[in-house]
């Protein structure tokens, strides 16, 4: 929204805003006493303050994308405006293996981001690992592996500069403590919250799980019961976590709530999932209800899954017109698009009582140049490997340099 150019009005509004935030925190403190941790209320925001971050997801999928991850991370690192990287899940393709080695390698590549790396799991990352081409893993086993990597220190992100966050692992509801991946934190006038909501029907999956043995292994009755119980418990925890996120936003007197999850949201507050059942309805109804009760906050639902790259204002319709939808870039079926594009998101704080405004600007990553083949008897294969290695070192050496890319 346009800001006034009258200096006295800016100073006056800023002072009022500081008072509003402090008094609001006192009033709302009891609402989030069980969830506020190290990430607590922000030091304060004034009119025109901004928060900028990189929004990505569904990356890397293919071996070609994995080979270009160093270039991708270096490009984001070179942007001085970016304060953290948000990844909405799916760090592998749906047909890729779920081995420890594969997981460890991808995790290591994400740790080359200079800023905090804030992540929520996707279905490819664990629920779909039962597939034959994924290695026939038990999904619960792979979720444990994901948590051991990305949430090894509860209340802290990973990345080159870890950031303190509040985690559901410290919830007063003991049953929710396993959901260490559900987090929130404040930056200026925005409260950011992650909820573990995934595609593949939240992990219920489809009937082919038990009938199509060429793709899915047959599970025992006990394994199926455990899988369903996990989904039910996670959905209930997500709903409670949404309450905690908005309570934190009230305490921070935030102008916006940015919600990150992997699953593509439904078309409305009471619609079913795009494929099968009602496993997303409780979460979506809660989001719509909370957004409707906070009309002066901009609510953004950020997700991946379909790789459509879109920004959709007024997504909530007449029920909650303050909801917008943001979907990240992603794999383009075997290509490298996911590592050549990312979204630069900036939230701008407004005057008290008005929603923050968001801008989403697509960023294009310069492709790694083809290696120069010198004269001599060396083989092309050796030259190619050496050339890529030289480019990688050059990129690493120029982290955080604005001139590193065109």
Image (tube, helix red, strand yellow):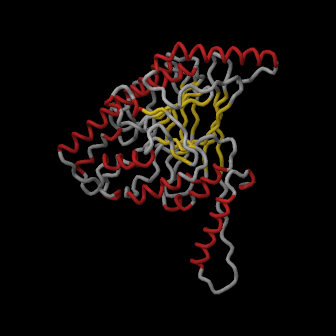
**Residue sitting at 24 percent across and 55 percent down?**
213
Q: Nearer the viewer, residue 395 or 227?
A: 395
Q: Position of residue 307 (x, y in %)?
A: 51, 45
In this view, which residue lies farthest toward the bottom? 377
- Asked if residue 216 lies left or right of residue 75, the reply is left
**Residue sitting at 34 percent across and 52 percent down?**
129
Image quadrant in which you'd find residue 279: top left
36 is higher (above) or lower (below) than 228: above
Q: Position of residue 104 (x, y in %)?
A: 44, 56
213 is higher (above) or lower (below) than 318: below
Q: Position of residue 191 (x, y in %)?
A: 55, 28
10 is higher (above) or lower (below) than 267: above
* Quadrant occupied by the C terminus: bottom right
226 is higher (above) or lower (below) than 95: above
Q: How many numbered marks does the figure carry?
A: 0
* Quadrant occupied by the N terminus: top right
- Asked if residue 160 lies left or right of residue 264, the reply is right
């Amino acid at each position: 929204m346009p800001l006034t150019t009258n200096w006295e009005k800016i100073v006056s509004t800023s002072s009022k805003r500081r008072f509003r935030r402090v008094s609001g925190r006192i009033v709302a403190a009891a609402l989030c006493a069980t969830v506020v941790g190290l990430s607590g209320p922000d030091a304060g925001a004034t009119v025109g303050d901004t928060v900028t971050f990189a929004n990505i997801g569904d990356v890397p999928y293919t071996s070609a994308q994995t080979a270009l991850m160093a270039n991708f991370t270096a490009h984001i690192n070179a942007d001085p405006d970016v304060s953290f990287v948000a990844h909405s899940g799916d760090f592998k393709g749906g047909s890729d293996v779920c081995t420890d080695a594969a997981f460890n390698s991808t995790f290591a590549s994400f740790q080359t981001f200079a800023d905090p790396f804030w992540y929520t799991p996707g279905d490819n990352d664990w629920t779909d690992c039962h597939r034959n081409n994924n290695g026939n893993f038990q999904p619960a086993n792979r979720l444990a592996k994901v948590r051991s990597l990305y949430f090894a220190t509860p209340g802290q992100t990973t990345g080159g500069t870890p950031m303190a966050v509040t985690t559901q692992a410290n919830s007063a509801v003991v049953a929710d403590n396993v959901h260490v991946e559900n987090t929130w934190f404040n930056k200026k006038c925005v409260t950011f919250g992650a909820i573990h909501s995934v595609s593949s029907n939240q992990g219920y999956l489809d009937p082919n799980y038990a009938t199509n043995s060429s793709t899915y292994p047959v599970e025992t009755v006990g394994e199926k019961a455990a899988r369903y119980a996990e989904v039910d418990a996670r959905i209930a925890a997500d709903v409670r976590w949404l309450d905690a996120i908005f309570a934190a936003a009230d305490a921070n007197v935030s102008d916006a709530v940015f919600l990150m999850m992997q699953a593509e949201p439904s078309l409305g507050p009471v619609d079913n999932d795009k494929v099968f059942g009602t496993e997303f309805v409780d979460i979506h109804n809660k989001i719509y209800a909370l957004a409707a009760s906070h009309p002066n906050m901009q609510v953004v639902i950020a997700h991946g899954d379909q790789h459509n790259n879109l920004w959709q204002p007024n997504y909530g319709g007449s029920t909650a017109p303050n909801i917008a939808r943001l979907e990240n870039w992603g794999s383009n079926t075997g290509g490298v698009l996911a590592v050549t594009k990312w979204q630069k998101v900036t939230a701008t704080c407004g005057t008290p009582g008005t929603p923050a405004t968001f801008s989403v600007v697509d960023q294009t990553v310069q492709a790694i140049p083809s290696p120069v083949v010198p004269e001599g008897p060396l083989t092309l294969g050796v030259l190619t490997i050496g050339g890529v290695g030289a480019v990688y070192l050059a990129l690493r050496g120029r982290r955080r340099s604005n001139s590193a890319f065109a």
